[in-house]
Image (spheres, rainbow, N blue to C red):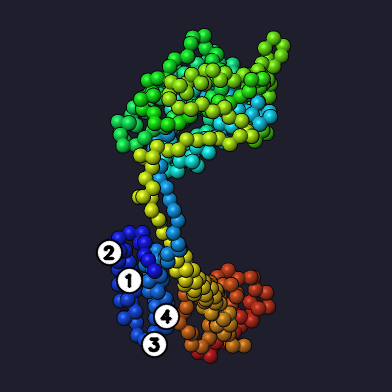
Amino acid sequence: MILQPVLHPVLLVLLCAAPAVLVVRELVRRGPASPGRPIWALRLGMLVVVFAMLLRPGIPGGTSQTLATDTDIVIVADTTASIIAEDWDGDRPRMTGVRADVQAIVDEYPGARFSLISFDAAAQQRLPLTTDATALMSSLDVMLPEITDQSRGSSISIANRMLTEVLAAAAKASPERSRMVFYLGDGEQTASQEPESFASSAKYVDGGAVLGYGTAEGGPMKRTTGRPSTGSGTQDGAGGDYIEYQGERALSVIDEDNLQRISEQLGVEYQHRTADAAIELPDAPTSTTDYASSGEVGNVIELYWTAALVLLAMVAVELTRATMLVTRLRGLTSQAPAQARVPEALERPQVQQGVRPEQGPRAPEAPGGAERRLEWGVGIEGPQAPASPGASRASATQRRHDGGAS
């Protein structure tokens, strides 16, 4: 077994030590018979499992051969309106072939650094030198040709100065690395002036190729809008209408003479590309492809996920216990008001039948007693209903009798 800790082991120990001390102190403070001791032991186990996960345990899982190409590769891609002419593999846009060939270049030179330059009315470096081949292909996927209505003609050599600058900077930064150039286009010159030469870049080039796309018969071109198209399966930016010239569809024809001239200026081979022929790529410069140091790299089968499963089970136990405690507490809270109520029979004072409340010893007046008597209508003075005449005479006779007796 091997360990690949996410941090230095000392840092991991310090990270887990503080919560571990708190949990251990709580375990020591509680007696062996304490009902809460098992849950604290569970929490200590959770800390141990987390520490094991951070160590990233694993076992060797075999070896694989690797190869690193110590080369800088610059790809120069045509993005004029003619690059979506429909004569690749029947009636598909030429850009489809460009993307497929760039993917083949990436596969042929693993570990190389790639840069992407596009050109139409102007040259643009879309991607600096990087080993991220995914970024290269993503740049190609979103790369759109120039907008047809804004096109004023383009030169096939407009990228020569930018190419020279990129190669010179790469040579200065990493003189030990070799450099390759792949030029992808149809060679169609639509600018009025003659193409410039790529000879200034030749001294930095150790290999590469010029790849030509298109047919002698030519292919029709749709208008480009600068927005990704939908429905064709490719993001070529083409609209629905074809470009017309004198009432007929305009055709883009490959110019292999221009492409041959560029290959001679760069000192690389020219290759006409078709969908039914596999691309032929040159070998990487042998002086910069290090087979010996590539060696064998061990593949590791990670085991941290087993500790993660154990931790998940422990967390489930903790959550279950917490849910039970909350449920029990809610039950006790709901029962408390019912137990605290005083029976209604104990709230009212008892009145003996036939005895007026004024007679006999009185209990101490409880707060609110007057209000209760007022509510029941007995034993208080205050506004009373008028007495009947008979009741008034009886009352007066009773008072005279009481006075004579006294």
Return the disc, 4 or 3, that comes first in the chain's sequence.
3
Report crowding for label 2: few under 14, some 14 to 19, many 20 or more residues within 10 A (C-alpha).
few
Q: Amino acid at mark 2?
A: Val
Q: Given contact means CB atoms under 8 Å apart, are the residues at marks 4 and 3 in contact? A: no
Q: Secondary structure at mark 4?
A: helix
Q: Looking at the picture, which amino acid does disc 1 mark?
A: Ala
Q: Is residue 175 visible?
A: yes
Q: Are marks 1 and 4 in contact (CB under 8 Å)?
A: no
The alpha-carbon separation of the residues under discs 4 and 2 comes to 29 Å
Which label sits in the foreground, 3 or 1?
1
Marked residue nearer the N-terminal end (1 or 4): 1
According to the image, label 3 marks what residue? 33
Q: CA distance from mark 3 to mark 1?
A: 21 Å
Q: CA distance from mark 4 to mark 3?
A: 10 Å
Q: Quadrant of the N terminus?
A: bottom left
* Structural crowding at the residue carrying mark 4, measured as other residues with C-alpha within 10 Å and reported as few (<14), some (14–19) or many (≥20): few
Question: Where is mark 1, residue-wise?
Answer: 20
What residue is pinned by disc 4?
A: 38
* Residue at 38% across, 74% down: 44
**Marking on residue 10:** 2
Q: Amino acid at mark 4?
A: Pro
Eye-nearest disc, 1 or 4 = 1
Residue 385, image quadrant: bottom right
Can residue 228 be seen here? no
